[in-house]
């Protein structure tokens, strides 16, 4: 069975995402799709609108056959580690033939050229990187700045390519495949009309996830931008008090953690950089919400996304020492299954004899460290539900892997 892999967040899954899955099968000739999906906290350092099992159900109802969880220690990282964790998961499964990702470019060749620059940076790019690091930037920020300057000096590279987030993620997927020496073949398809960060509904049936989340907050209709099954799932979850989840769902707990922390204590958490902790603590007394706190604390250096990742690390209790002990550069420690279809069940059986990591379908004692952190993230995420009982029900050991057959949800 020819199998394609995709990397997703589905926050929430909309028509553009469904189109991606349809085009993935068309372009690659795949019979089945494996999706590696972020769990409850996402790449830009924010909580998901809906919990991961609802988003898994959306994926399985709209073309995915097997959904795997990207560990939270990767899902909340900058592009390089996010991409590496996801691609390493697909690679470790042992049955994925192709990786298909959406990009603004829609053409694989220039993305491959950029990924080769990352794998083997020329001296000029290396010099630019060293200059950026000397300015006190974090490595991801320094690399992005160095790459932009290098491209502007090149006559062969398109400088606009690096200005689009999905192009950059695609380059990192390609770099991860190279680093892993993976046999998985890459494909890219051009994203549909809506931009990644567009906040308005500019098209009849396609909108960005950002625009959809904003419409949810403003209680505007979103039905035409979601597959019908996903609209029903979302309505069901909201009615049960399981969402919509946003930063404001955690204002009280996060403000308490900040208020009782010293600057030095904050600097022990992942993603906190020298100076950021002072900006955040100085902004805290006048902030009425997490969003307002981030707005007051952000600067050109400490961007919105970087502050969100730091706050997520504090909320989840993920320290720099803990990340170092997990050795993220070595890849995930397991493969966590969130759900599957009948075809996905077949994929799991095939992977049993070839996977290079343990495949976890049931939570038991002594789970791998990254799954333990995922479980901790779930417990904390559930604090954001408006219905306390709904939060109590959202415990990993109680929730079976989702099995979708003929459009119905079974456990």
Image (tube, helix red, strand yellow):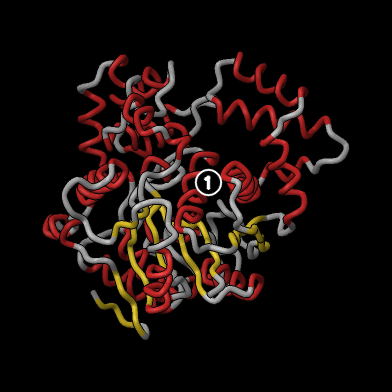
In the image, 310: left or right of 410? right
In the image, 354: left or right of 120? left
The single residue placed furthest to the bottom in the displayed view is 406
Residue 48: give x, y in percent of width and height.
36, 53
Residue 214: give x, y in percent of width and height.
44, 56
Q: Is residue 274 above or below residue 306?
A: above
Q: Nearer the viewer, residue 360 or 33?
A: 360
Q: Which residue is mark 1?
A: 83
In the image, 95: left or right of 67? right
Q: Nearer the viewer, residue 322 or 334?
A: 334
Quarter residue 294 falls in: top left
In the image, what residue occupies the spot 22% across and 29% down? 257
Quarter residue 200 falls in: bottom right
In the image, what residue occupies the spot 66% across and 23% down? 129
Q: Is residue 20 above or below residue 383?
A: below
Q: Is residue 48 above or below residue 406?
A: above
Residue 64: give x, y in percent of width and height.
46, 71
The single residue placed furthest to the right in the displayed view is 155
Quarter residue 52 falls in: bottom left
Check disc 1 and report its element: helix, strand or loop. Answer: helix
Q: Nearer the viewer, residue 373 or 140?
A: 373
In the image, 211: left or right of 130? left
Q: Is residue 202 above or below residue 264?
A: below
Q: Nearer the viewer, residue 351 or 198?
A: 351
Residue 150: give x, y in percent of width and height.
76, 29
In the image, what residue occupies the spot 65% across and 56% down? 103
In the image, what residue occupies the spot 26% across and 26% down? 258
Is residue 141 visible in this depiction of the protein? yes
């Amino acid at each position: 069975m020819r199998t394609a892999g995709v990397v997703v967040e589905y926050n929430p899954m909309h028509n553009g995402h469904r189109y991606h899955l349809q085009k993935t099968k068309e372009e690659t000739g795949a019979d089945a799709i494996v999706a590696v999906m972020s769990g409850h906290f996402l790449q830009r350092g924010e909580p998901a609108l809906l919990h991961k099992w609802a988003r898994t159900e959306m994926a399985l109802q709209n073309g995915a056959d097997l959904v795997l969880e990207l560990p939270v220690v990767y899902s909340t990282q900058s592009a390089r580690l996010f991409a590496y964790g996801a691609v390493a998961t697909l690679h470790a499964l042992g049955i994925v033939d192709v990786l298909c990702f959406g990009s603004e470019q829609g053409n694989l060749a220039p993305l491959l050229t950029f990924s080769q620059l990352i794998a083997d940076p020329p001296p000029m790019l290396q010099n630019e990187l060293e200059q950026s690091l000397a300015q006190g930037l974090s490595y991801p920020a320094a690399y992005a700045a160095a790459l932009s300057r290098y491209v502007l000096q090149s006559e062969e590279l398109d400088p606009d390519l690096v200005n689009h987030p999905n192009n950059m993620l695609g380059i990192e997927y390609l770099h991860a495949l190279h680093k892993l020496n993976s046999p998985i073949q890459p494909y890219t398809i051009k994203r549909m009309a809506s931009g990644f960060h567009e906040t308005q509904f500019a098209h009849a049936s396609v909108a960005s996830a950002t625009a959809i989340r904003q419409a949810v907050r403003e209680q505007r209709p979103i039905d035409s931008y979601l597959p019908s099954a996903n609209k029903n799932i979302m309505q069901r979850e909201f009615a049960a008090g399981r969402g919509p989840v946003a930063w404001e769902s955690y204002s009280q707990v996060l403000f308490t953690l900040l208020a009782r922390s010293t600057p030095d204590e904050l600097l022990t958490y992942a993603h906190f950089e020298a100076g950021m902790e002072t900006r955040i603590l100085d902004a805290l007394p006048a902030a009425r919400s997490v969003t307002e706190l981030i707005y007051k604390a952000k600067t050109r250096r400490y961007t919105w996304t970087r502050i969100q990742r730091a706050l997520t690390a504090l909320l989840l209790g993920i320290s720099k020492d803990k990340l170092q002990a997990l050795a993220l550069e070595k890849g995930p420690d397991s493969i966590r299954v969130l759900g599957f279809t009948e075809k996905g069940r077949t994929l799991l059986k095939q992977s049993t004899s070839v996977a290079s990591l343990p495949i976890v379908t049931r939570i038991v004692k002594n789970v791998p460290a990254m799954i333990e952190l995922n479980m901790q993230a779930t417990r904390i995420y559930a604090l954001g539900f408006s219905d306390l009982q709904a939060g109590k029900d959202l415990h990993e050991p109680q929730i079976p892997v989702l099995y979708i057959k003929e459009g119905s949800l079974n456990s």
